[in-house]
């Protein structure tokens, strides 16, 4: 019996927390991928208290599209970055392998702000062409270039 007396307050507190948690979500209306909530219906304010009311409508059905860059018309602005290394020897080794695999320009550049040697593949006039080449690289060598991305070629 002594064990039961000590456990009763714990059960009572847990039950009260469950009931309080379930009663906090009163009304939320969801249609498709658009959510509408009215906070005045979900909050309980004392009479005479001032409240602000607002409606929030979010449409998550639209996918982001790639915006063409203002510099996309100039040739040679984009590349696929396949790595960044602290040691130039490591960057040179990766660049040499890429030169054997691809018939495009391979460049190794030093980023002074980050202190890294970056290996860039290609010299594409548009970001979309660089993305397409990156996808071809990943398809042909999935384990080697799965983390590659398109980037602007730094201007010297």
Image: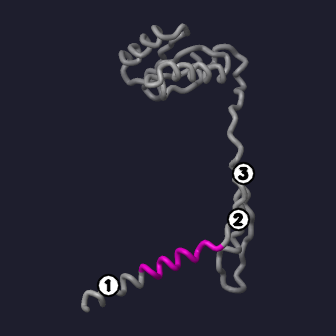
Give the residue at mark 3: 59
> Label 2 near label 3: C-beta < 8 Å?
no
Kindly identify which residue carries mark 2.
29
Residue in the picture at 38% in, 14% down:
93
Does any portion of residue 76 appear in the rendered image? yes
User: How busy is the neighbourhood of tag 2: few (under 14 within 10 Å), some, or many (20 plus)?
Assistant: few
Q: Does the segment drawn in magenta span residue 19?
A: yes
Indicate which label's residue lies in the foreground, 3 or 2. Answer: 2
**Magenta span of residues:** 14-26
Label 2 – label 1 distance at C-alpha? 40 Å
Residue shown at 70% from the left, 86% from the top: 47
Rendering quarter of residue 151: top right
Q: Main secondary structure of the magenta part?
A: helix
Which image quarter is the C terminus in?
Answer: top right
Q: Residue at x 74, y 63 (%)?
A: 55
Residue placed most toward the observer, 65 or 29: 29
Residue to which mark 1 is pinned: 7
Q: Position of residue 42 (x, y in %)?
A: 66, 73
Whether residue 154 can be seen here: no
Where is 107 relative to 85, above or below? above
User: Quick one: quadrant of the N terminus?
Assistant: bottom left
- 47 is higher (above) or lower (below) than 23: below
């Amino acid at each position: 019996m002594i064990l039961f007396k000590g456990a009763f307050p714990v059960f009572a507190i847990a039950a009260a927390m469950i009931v309080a948690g379930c009663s906090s979500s009163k009304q939320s209306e969801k249609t498709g991928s658009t959510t509408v909530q009215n906070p005045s219906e979900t909050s309980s304010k004392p009479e005479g208290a001032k409240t602000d009311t607002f409606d929030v409508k979010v449409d998550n059905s639209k996918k982001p599209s790639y915006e063409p860059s203002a510099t996309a018309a100039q040739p040679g602005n984009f590349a696929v970055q396949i790595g960044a290394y602290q040691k130039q020897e490591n960057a040179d080794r990766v660049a040499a392998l890429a030169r054997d695999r691809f018939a495009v320009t391979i460049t190794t550049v030093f980023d002074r702000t980050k202190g890294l040697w970056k290996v860039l593949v290609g010299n594409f006039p548009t970001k979309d062409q660089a993305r397409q080449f990156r996808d071809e690289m990943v398809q042909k060598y999935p384990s080697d270039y799965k983390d590659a991305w398109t980037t602007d070629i730094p201007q010297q």
